Amino acid sequence: MPQLTHRLPIRTALLSSLALLLGVAAAPPSDALHRAIASPERDPAQVQRDGARRPAEVLTFIGVRPTSTIVEIWPGKHAYWTQILAPYLHDRGTYYLALGDTAGSGAEKAFASPPTEVAGDAATWAAGFDKVRLTQFSAAHPDPAPAGSVDTVLTFRNLHNWMGDGDAPQLLAAIHTALKPGGILGIEDHRARPDRPQDPKADDGYVRQDYAIALIEKAGFKLVATSEIEKNPRDTTHWPKGVWTLPPTFAMKDVDRAKYAAIGEADNFLLKFQKIG
């Protein structure tokens, strides 16, 4: 029996490490989440991307619940996640949609406009979006929600933008401030190959997973899980116009379009961090 006492912590540590490497198994997506994803109000062009973006699996992995207080940073003009999160959080949750800054950097300006569903006067917003709380997130406005009030911050395919602007550490620190103690940061981005040096500016839109982890942990977070939900082995990461060569952007327009369509959206990492300190 004494030997078992010593072996159990070792076995537990090994199992915990294995779970981190493989990605922690999440509970099945809730009915409420399935209803939000299946909503006929979603843009059909965005629904077509569900096979690549796998919304139910992604949000369940991160741990988003209908009662959560969520900040989504820089949703983009297509509002892929907004169209799911707004109805999902509508009745019992709180949803901050953090836009960029018209007076900020290039990337901040690019994400400054609200999605169509919440553009203009609030009285004209699309059905189900009336409780969205618009806010800002930029170097000059690093407070997307009251400090210490947020359960989960979500940011999809934005870390490379912050690296390009050179303010990733400051913005990650601002996210840390917004989160409750033990709060969660869910982050997705285009994965660079690990056998090549990381461009600090990520000009091609790709970020090494180990580089991202080190950068985020330095800002006061602990990695708690990784996922291969959005893995795409067809993405070699070497394209004429970086990640934007691939869908949905198709930066080469009609040149080799069928080839890039067959490759699909980029290989992406999905990481779950917890606020510490």
Image (cartoon, rainbow, N blue to C red):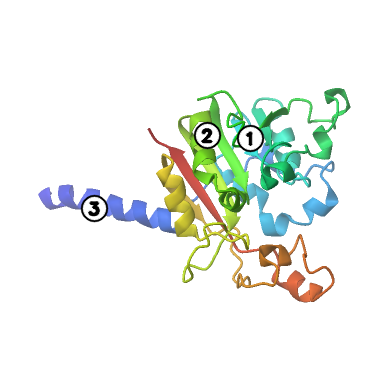
Which of disc 3 and disc 1 is earlier in sequence? 3
Residues under numbered marks 1 and 3 in contact, where contact means CB atoms less than 8 Å apart:
no
The kind of residue on which mark 3 rests is Ile
Residue 10 badge: 3
114 lies left or right of 68? right
Residues under numbered marks 2 and 1 in contact, where contact means CB atoms less than 8 Å apart:
yes
Residue 118 placed where, x, y %? Answer: 80, 33
Residue drawn at the location 49% of the way across and 70% of the way down: 196
Q: Quadrant of residue 69?
A: top right
* Front-lying residue, 258 or 203: 203
Residue drawn at the location 69% of the way across and 59% of the way down: 52
Residue drawn at the location 23% of the way across and 53% of the way down: 10
42 lies left or right of 7? right
Q: Is residue 24 visible?
A: no
At numbered mark 2, what does the secondary structure look like: helix, strand or loop? helix
Residue 12 badge: none
**Mark 2 crowdedness (10 Å alpha carbons): few <14, some 14-19, many ≥20:** many
Which of disc 1 and disc 2 is earlier in sequence? 1
